[in-house]
Image (spheres, helix red, strand yellow):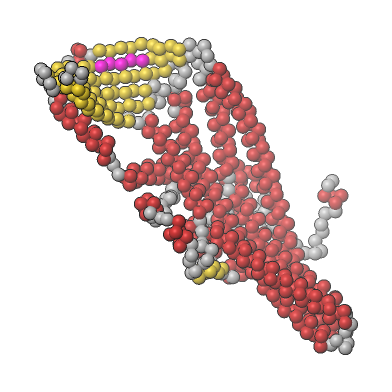
Amino acid sequence: MTVLNFCRLGTTLTLLALFGCSADYYEKQADKDVYQILKTVEKDIFGESSQFSIASGKSSKEQQALTPVKILNDRKSTEKVRLSLNQALDYAVANSREYQSEKERLYLTALTLTGEQHEFRPNLFGSSQANYTRQIDGEEVGTASSALGVNQALATGGSLGVTLANDLLQYFSGDPRRSATSLITLNLAQPLLRGAGRDVAVENLTQANRNVVYAIRDYTHFQNTFSVSIVNEYFDLLRSKDVIFNEYNNYQSRKKNVEYLSARVDRERPEAVGIAEQDELSARNRYISAISDYRNALDSFKVTLGLPQTTQLRLDDAEIIKLRAGGLKPISLSSREAFAIALDHRLPLFNQVDRFEDSKRQVGIAANQLKADLALVGNASLANSGGPVDYTKFNFNDVRATVGLQLNLPLDRLRERNQYRATLINFESSIRTLSRNFDELRNLLDRRIRELEEFRQSYEIQKGAVKLARNRVEGNQLRLQAGTVEFRQLSESQDALISAQNAETSAIVNYLSARLGLLVELGVLDPNSKDYWLSDNPSKIKALGRPANPQPAFAPSDKVPTPEELFE
């Protein structure tokens, strides 16, 4: 390679710096690296990988062209949409802003890892510079310098670099002359005490790798909780719809009471008509309030799904019919069994345990920083000056090499001492945090199990209460016509009926919410199967060998513990 060719190479480097690769190219390269990392780590954790992507369907240029007006216009849809629960889940995954934010958080964590990995790979660099100088004496001088090289951090804590440089000096006036110098340099630095060793050297890379594992677990747990939250909101809306129908029927019934009593004013006491009219107004108000509550909840659900507020959303009433038809899906677990399952399957708990290990590892890293700085350093260079240079004919007997030790005594380690002491305190705090996490998990699972049993019994009670209240209303209506009861008794029985009907719907929806919540906390929920909220218990619970429904249906005659028995 001649000096002229090397100068041309320098010019090429300059052009690359000016025009380089496009922004789209870098975006695609980042996506490629990140998606490969996530695919690999997912396979290591779960045995399989997902088709993870943060793509929004629009290119970066299209997104940059968006204006607030365009975004506002996109939110003005008046489309009529009817969503089943499965369709609502699919729509939420595709359009929920919260869901997209969690995906981007995971992406950014993996993106950070690519930067840490880059440090331990050969990193190429190139530079070129050209100058023209007119000196005081009128002499004109031109200089050009170019360099190519590679640097790499070593897992031992050291660094290695190789540089190929060329300097050209050209005099344009007076006696035209030219000189060129080419240089190949090798530099090596390896710490022997402070900063030495793989554990210390790759700590940032290690933590970045572990952070990706944590982020994938957190994202997977979020997917489960998000899916369950959509199911719960959907059934809460269906419960509100059921309340609307119940309140409307109650309102119509109260209107009929007024009409009936008004027609019999000669046979009824005047205050009975007034009571009936007051009941009618109260029922009307409750009906209007139920409508308002439903509309508010529906608007909130649109926000969760990512639907424009102007969309006319309708739900599928068949979902709650299927829920009632399927009945309750009991989970028979003792506190000890539930905790054992969570220890094996709960992803947030795995992260809590691993973060405890991180804090323990940090103690050793901080202790290493208290050592003296002792490093082995060396460099070798091979120069060639004068005319054209042929790099294949370097005289390696002209190599100039240096090797030595650098020592920096640990005379001032106050900051490092403080960091080490803080790390010890953080580790002691992590011990308390982990033990608290274990206790809080037990507490959470115990509460979930108790809630499940409470709602199970509540549902059985309310089913019986609805039947009794309906019979009572029908009986009082007949007795009122016969003149054997006062109107107030009919009014009270109607109040009891509407309360029991609303409570029955609430009980089955509350039971579903508690059951799904328990499965999420155990870490055994599979939200990818269709209609999973209607499915039987996961195989991990069935594997315990417990009967599917060991508890008999609750009946009013069932014996309940006395306070003395409860606190014995």
Q: Is residue 416 above or below residue 109?
A: above
In which quarter of the view is residue 457 placed? bottom right
Q: Is residue 41 left or right of residue 135?
A: right
Please tell me which residue lies in front, 552 or 509. 509
What segment is highlighted magenta in the picture? 377-381
From the top left corner, tell me how far across and down residue 11 is, in percent.
20, 32
User: Total label count?
Assistant: 0
Task: Give me the residue at 62% from left, 26% from top.
Answer: 425
Name the magenta segment's main secondary structure: strand
Q: Is residue 177 above or below residue 344?
A: above
Q: Is residue 248 above or below residue 361?
A: below
Please tell me which residue lies in front, 84 or 140. 140
Q: Is residue 528 left or right of residue 28?
A: right
Is residue 324 in sight in this rendering?
A: no
From the top left corner, tell me how far across and down residue 429 is, in percent.
63, 30
Task: Give me the residue at 81% from left, 88% from top.
Answer: 263
From the top left corner, tell me how far across and down residue 147 is, in percent.
25, 26
Is residue 6 in sight in this rendering?
A: yes
| Quadrant of the frame with the N terminus | top left
User: Magenta span has 525?
Assistant: no
Task: Give me the residue at 85% from left, 75% from top.
Answer: 489
Residue at the far left in the pictured view? 175
From the top left corner, tell me how far across and down residue 455 is, in percent.
71, 59
Task: Give me the residue at 35% from left, 31% from top.
Answer: 121
Q: Is residue 522 left or right of residue 41?
A: right
